[in-house]
Amino acid sequence: MATVLVVDDTLTDSEIIAGTLRRSGFETVSVSSSEDAKTTLGDLKPDAIVLDIVLPGESGFEFCRSLKADPQTSDIPIVMCSTKDGEIDRFWGMKQGASSYITKPINPEELIRTVRLLVSVSP
């Protein structure tokens, strides 16, 4: 079973994303900041990460960039998931190394389809 790390500081969004993924057969681990995610990544290498952009401290953009620069985490697919739905936000997310970008409120089918696709093609 594939494991997805959900990084979102809004409890409701985190629960919706994690619940949607769990109902589709994924294991999930949820944290509320990039700092908590870094700690979690010390113990766990998830199959994918669903990452909010607006986080306390380091933003999702910054965190994504640091993950992609680190050989230990560079191959983990990252799905940016944010209320920011402008073309520049999507462009910037993909430029930081995200594999995909979806907007909130999430469309459950889109989230599941996106994560399944990324997990099946990841090494």
Image (cartoon, rainbow, N blue to C red):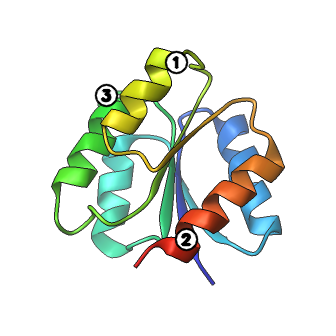
Circle 3 or circle 1, nearest the eye: 1
Position in image of residue 82 (x %, y %): 58, 29
In the image, taking residue 43 as reference, residue 68 lies left or right, namely left
**Residue under pointer 3:** 57
Q: Position of residue 69 (x, y in %)?
A: 17, 52
User: In the figure, 121 relative to 30: above or below?
Assistant: below
Please identify the residue farthest to the bottom as the structure is shown: 1
Residue at left 40%, top 37%?
94
Residue 17 image offset from top left, x and y in percent: 70, 49
Name the secondary structure under disc 1.
helix
Quickly name the residue at label 2: 119
Left or right: 70 with respect to 101?
A: left
Check contact, mark 2 vs mark 1: CB within 8 A: no
Please report whichever mark, 3 or 1, sits nearer to the chain's N-terminal start: 3
Q: Quadrant of the C terminus?
A: bottom left
Q: Please determine whether, in this image, residue 45 is positioned above or below residue 14.
A: below
Mark 3–mark 1 Cα distance, whole angstroms, equals 24 Å
Q: Counting other residues with Cα less than 10 Å from the Cα at mark 3, is it few (<14), some (14-19), or many (20 or more)? A: few
Q: CA distance from mark 3 to mark 2?
A: 28 Å
